[in-house]
Amino acid sequence: MKKETTLGDLSDVGEEVDSVFISDPDGLHGSQESKSVDGQSHPKLGSAQLVISGRGKKMTRIDELGDDHAQTSKETPLRKDAFAISPEEKVSQIECRFREIMEILGLDLSDDSLSGTPKRVAKMYVHETFGGLLPENKPAVSLFDNAYEYNEMLVEKDVEVYSTCEHHFVPIIGRAHVAYFSSGQVIGLSKINRIVQYYSKRPQVQERLNVQIVEELQKALNAKDVACVIEAKHLCVNSRGVRDTKSSTVTAIYRGKFHDHNIKSEFLKHISIDVDFNL
Ligand SMILES: [Zn+2]
């Protein structure tokens, strides 16, 4: 049975939450007045993109949300034809479009300093910043027997998170702390970092990133006892908009045994220990 939560109830994101969606107080979701933002037909667009009208003034849902961060699904929203063209073709098409954006901004692309930027950005988008959209980049995970019979909690902490806010396309920078109990098998420690990196290299919202990391680890480890806490700075909040440079966002997902108060406390104690070895 799916439980749904509305915006404003995001602290509840956790094991029980299967989807997060924007409530539709105006009741216009799916009504005949609704059409997509640009007036064109986008059958795959969700309610976040519907046009709503009120008090004689048309206002898009996007206008209404402003800087608020919409939530739709725990899967990254991908088009059906997401992989119809090769990564290299994507680089070439993004290069053209990014050149247009720069030109619209009034920049002179014949300047030596700018001429290579469209290609540089396109390659960075496809192969680095959003490389986690390509299924071929998903880390292969091998399982090993739990030969040491280590049955306590294993914590991999301070895993670097370098992601991108999908609402503003600016960086999300932080740390993930991951823990699990072996169900008989283990994975190489670096695979945890690679799973975090893979899902980070996508346009993201932190709650979804957290869910994707936990569910991938549950699958990879064939284990249900997995937890992940992410603390991150969102540059859309820190560097623009409200420009609150101090604030950061913490999300936490606990599955299986981690719901137990003592186990959760032990995990949180482990991740609060400062282990900066200055290596
Ligand atoms: Zn943002």
Image (cartoon, helix red, strand yellow):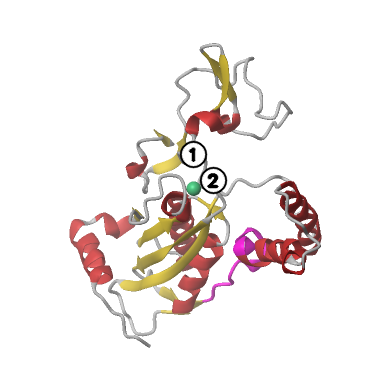
Residue 116 percent coordinates (x, y):
76, 67
Residue 184 percent coordinates (x, y):
39, 73
**Total marks in image:** 2
* Tag 1 near tag 2, CB within 8 Å: yes
Whether disc 2's CB lies below 8 Å from ligand 1 is answered: yes
Q: Which residues are magenta?
A: 129-142
Q: Which residue is mark 1?
A: 70
Residue 45 percent coordinates (x, y):
64, 34
Secondary structure at badge 2 equals: loop
Using residue 275 as the reference point, say whether residue 202 is left or right of it. Answer: right
Using residue 41 as the reference point, say whether residue 53 is left or right of it. Answer: left
Does the magenta-highlighted stretch encompass residue 3? no
Can residue 251 be seen? no
Query: Tag 1: residue type?
Result: Ala
Mark closer to the observer (1, 2):
2
**Compared with residue 237, is residue 279 higher up or lower down, i.e. above or below?**
below
Q: Which residue is mark 2?
A: 167
- Quarter holding the N terminus is top left
Secondary structure at badge 1 equals: loop
Residue 97 percent coordinates (x, y):
77, 51
| Quarter of image, res 46 | top right
Whether disc 1's CB lies below 8 Å from ligand 1 is answered: no
Q: CA distance from mark 1 to mark 2?
A: 8 Å
Q: Residues within 10 Å of mark 1 (few under 14, many from 20)?
A: some
Query: Tag 2: residue type?
Result: His
Using residue 119 as the reference point, say whether residue 261 is left or right of it. Answer: left
| Quarter of image, res 232 | bottom left
